[in-house]
Amino acid sequence: MTGTLKKNRTQLITLAALAFLLVTAAQGLETKDWVITVLRGLSVGMVTFLVASGLSLIFGLMDVLNLAHGEMFMLGAYVGWTVFVRPDTFVDILAPLLLLFVGFILTPLWRALLARVRFSGRAAQLWPWMAAIIAFIILGLTLVSFPITKWDPEVYAESPITFSLALDQGNLALPEPKPFEAAPIIAILGTLAGSSLLASAFAGFGQRKQTGRMSQHIPRGPVITAVILLILALAAFWGNDALTEWLINIGTTGRFFLAMGVATVAGFVIGGVMETTMIRPLYDRPMYQLMITLGISFIIIEVVRAIWGRPEFTMPKAALFSGRGDACPAESIGDLIANQCSTVILFDGRIRTYNEIFIILVGLIVLIAVGLLLRRTRIGMIIRAGVQDSEMVEALGINVRQVFTFVFALGVALASLGGVLAAPSIGLSSVMGGQFLLLALIALAIGGLTSFPGAAAGAILVGLIQQFIIKYGQIGINIPFLDEPFKPSPPLVPASVVLLMVIILLVLPNGLFGRSE
Amino acid sequence: MGNLLEVLNIHTFIGQFHILEGVNLEVPQGSITVLLGRNGAGKTTTLKSILGLTPPREGKVIFAGEEIQGQRSFDIAALGIGFVPEHRAIFRDLSVLENLKIAERKKGDLARKEAFIFNLFPDLKRLIKLSGMNLSGGQQQMLAVARALVPDNKLLLIDEPSEGLAPVLIEQMMEAIRQLSQDTTVLLVEQNFLMASRLAERYVIIEEGQSVTQGAMADLVGDEETIHRYLGAA
Amino acid sequence: MQTAISPKQNSTKAWLKDNGGMIGLLIFLAAFPFIVALFEGQPFTEVLANETGNAKFLQGLLIEVFILAIYAISYDLILGITGLLSFGHAMFFAAGAYFTGIAFKNYELGIGATLVGIVVLGIVQAILFGIVLPRVKGITFALVTLGMASMFHIIIQASELAEWTGADVGLQGVTTPDLINTSTERFRLYLITLMVTFLVYLVYRRFVDSPTGRVCVAIRENEDRALMLGYNTFHFKLAALILSSITAALAGFFHTVHQPIVSPNVAGLGWTVAALLIILMGGVGTLSGAMVGAAVFRLLEFFLDKQFGENANFLLGVIYVLLVLFLPFGIVGTWRAKRFRTQS
């Protein structure tokens, strides 16, 4: 016991100092202000945690600092908004997207088939390029023929802003679905053929690099997944209207939870694709991984601007969190649940249900779930081992590449979930990713770069300190020898959080929970 | 007695550095073979090249009659090669039990081998719940060896098991290796010549990235000149 | 006598031979405004009198390239040569830019005094980074420097400092001395920045070839080994930081002179990332890669912006990703590797 105390002396002192600071911070405040500030801090902290946890898992296991992680957060918000406000577009896009995946998921099948058909010399060099070009032409011709009812980011009357406002006021009118121009069957078959061809081209590129023998074994998993996806795609295609109808009828609450789910799944898929296609070839060149994640972040920002437009807009809150009836604001938790109030009175302060309760709740659930995954499952064990020494994990005969992909996908999924969770409270803009990436980096630095509990603690600290300083910015800080209280201007708030990071890093270079090598 | 492992003229690069410039070795089935050589001669790289952790650019590695060079490390390991790296590379954040469990290739591997492992290293049973970082150096080394015993391995690559251990523990480690070699073939890297000469039946000497000589241990023990030339004062 | 002189002559000749390409480039760039004028049918006297036209416009664009090159090469020294990953490099640049602007605007300092100030500023900043250097390594150093630079970025935007830094608007309407005014003396400024860029490059190459620079490379390769060999690696890292910081501040000086406004953006993470992208494109640790990268970076940005307007950033992103995947060691790095392979 004393041994552990001694070992972690610096950590304990730092934690005590932080606790002391928080208590003094609370001194000058009324209870209600204090409670609200703490809750807001926790809420910001939880969103930061969702970004930081993925960042820390990815950095810990693969030594990749994913600078596109903030943009994954942003993408989650925009995807969630689309499912929530424009379910018709979401349904329209489902069929072509699933069809694309059917083709790609069969890559291992192509690889196995290619191992049997060996092309010689020049042909092996050329054919993947040919296949890729033909695939792009086919996809270019067929993908556009899927009718997608879109908003127009350029025209105000049909922009995301307008649809958001309309939904919030309860008079959302969705545009008529567009008819199919050509025969649907051609579009479906064309997309399938195009994506399969592209996948075979990728398999061909991979084959050229590989030395040694290739497995000719036909993998069963991808084929089954592809068939399931194909059935889903066809169902989404022919059940388009019914599905849209159903999504509109389940109301905002149901749709919001669906949006959270879709954003998470989308993040998982995007993360997996990103790791396998762009990060994996670069594991022996870390600087270039940094650069490629930067490039990806630029691309995503521009894609988002092109699809959803440049102006900021808001995401309405689901009915569950926006009740404004007579019984609101609720006096107790029981009232709150019964009336679905948007605010609740606790300790005499008005607390917003969504921002200050729901976000924290979801954050806690994720924290516990990921914690359990890491502590209680075999894959969690492998991840923890890999953070320390992934080469040794490989030497045990564990396919560590698959674990890398899983962790990358999981990290991006968490960030994406964070994005959709934060959207109703902070709105959507193309710079939201950068802001939270910086907060997450600070949280990681404070908590210890590769430690999962550290990421959580760091994120919560960052949130709390930021909110307390904002609070003090409003009421002013009494500094001795100054007549008037000092009111820091709003830009100075982030500076204090950064200052905290610098100090902690200088005192504890490995962060609060990190361990020295 | 056939050869379980044959390494034919492998060349390995780390970055731009040509580390192995032609290593040949044979490990007969059921034997203990020891890799000898000075510091930096390429012994550890040889082990890692066999496993594909530092894949050789040229040459062949034949394990149980199958060419394995160029395959992915985890596929090679899954063929039945266990690796005990130098510096007691156990997983510090995992408990002793988890350190053993992670090495399972099939469910129930650990349950079957438990008795055997705890018979070799009785200490580990007592420490089973402890986190890896709280173990002493000797205990960590034993755990590293024990970890390689969990799955059914045909070949164990053991890198410097005696490094930094107290004499008593070295004796214990030697005894353990002798016992486990009754079921498993062992390729050992060892600086401690005394320990190596008492354990191994065969030796391979590596000098500046090349294998210079190999043969029966009994021949080497009497050959003062070779010992002096390649290993310094023994 | 003869024998004493001839090796020197030889070495001069050899130097000329080795650097023929560079000198040719220098001459070409110096003559570039006139070449443009020739194509445009503009009289040379107008170029010398800095009349409006494509010649003047392209000089302005190239001045931006030169400034970026100076800035990027300073980053290459600490990242590519010494192996220190810093995310706070923009601070060096921005401090120089702001200092120049404030010196000209609020204190009406002369060019000489301002440049002396730049050197002092560079040393002070390098020492600031040097203080944290022994405590933190690797990615933690990157985060601490990111933190310091972010604080700088935030503080210069604080409304408390509006009188000097112009808060979140930045410095507007800096009056630069007539001698190097970018609109009336564009050609002179063009030649000055061109010369400074090449001088910086030569100084840096000299530094890398010097014993000090060799130790810096050794630190990048394996700091522990350099320590074991008895070098106090801290001193060498600090030396690289000081040289780099002064150079970056100098780039900031020219930035303010040329623009002549300073936006708070130059202190942000984006500006550090620009330096990182430039040297990654050119080739890390090659020095000349920073120059090539700066040219590619700025000209690419310019042409994409002109051709595609709003979609330019998207294309830039795609080009980065493709560059990384298919040109693994940057432009200069890949070229050198190819030449090396064909030679051997």
Image: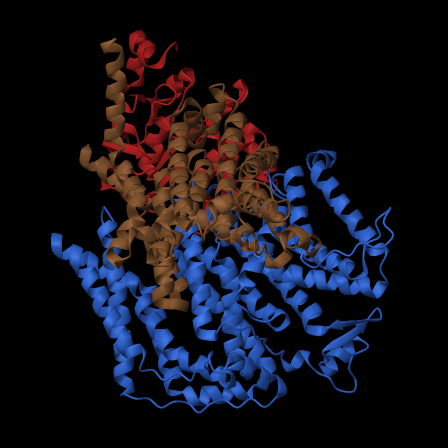
Give the colour in which the image draws chain B.
red
Q: Residue at x 37, y 17 (%)?
A: B197
Q: Nearer the viewer, residue B44 or C71?
A: C71
Q: Nearer the viewer, residue B109 or B74?
A: B74
Write down which chain is painted brown. Answer: C
Q: Tell me where residue A353 appears, x and y as whole percent.
A: 71, 73
Q: Nearer the viewer, residue C27 or A466?
A: C27
Q: Residue at x 53, y 30 (%)?
A: C238
Q: Is residue A427 left or right of residue B180?
A: right
| Way the structure is coloured | by chain
In the rendered image, the quadrant that contains the N terminus of chain A is top right
Residue B230 visible in the snapshot: yes
In the rendered image, the quadrant that contains the C terminus of chain A is top right
Q: Nearer the viewer, residue B151 or A276?
A: A276
The mark tally for this picture is 0
Q: Tell me where residue A396 appears, x and y as whole percent.
A: 41, 43
Q: Is residue A13 left or right of residue A171?
A: right
Q: Tell me where residue A471 appears, x and y as whole percent.
A: 76, 61
Q: Quadrant of residue B124?
A: top right
Q: Residue at x 50, y 23 (%)?
A: C227
Q: Is residue A424 left or right of residue A477?
A: left
Residue A72 vertical placement versus C6 (above, below): below
Give the colour in which the image draws chain A.
blue
Q: Residue at x 46, y 19 (%)?
A: C229
Residue C281 visible in the snapshot: no
Q: Tell me where residue A319 appears, x and y as whole percent.
A: 65, 82
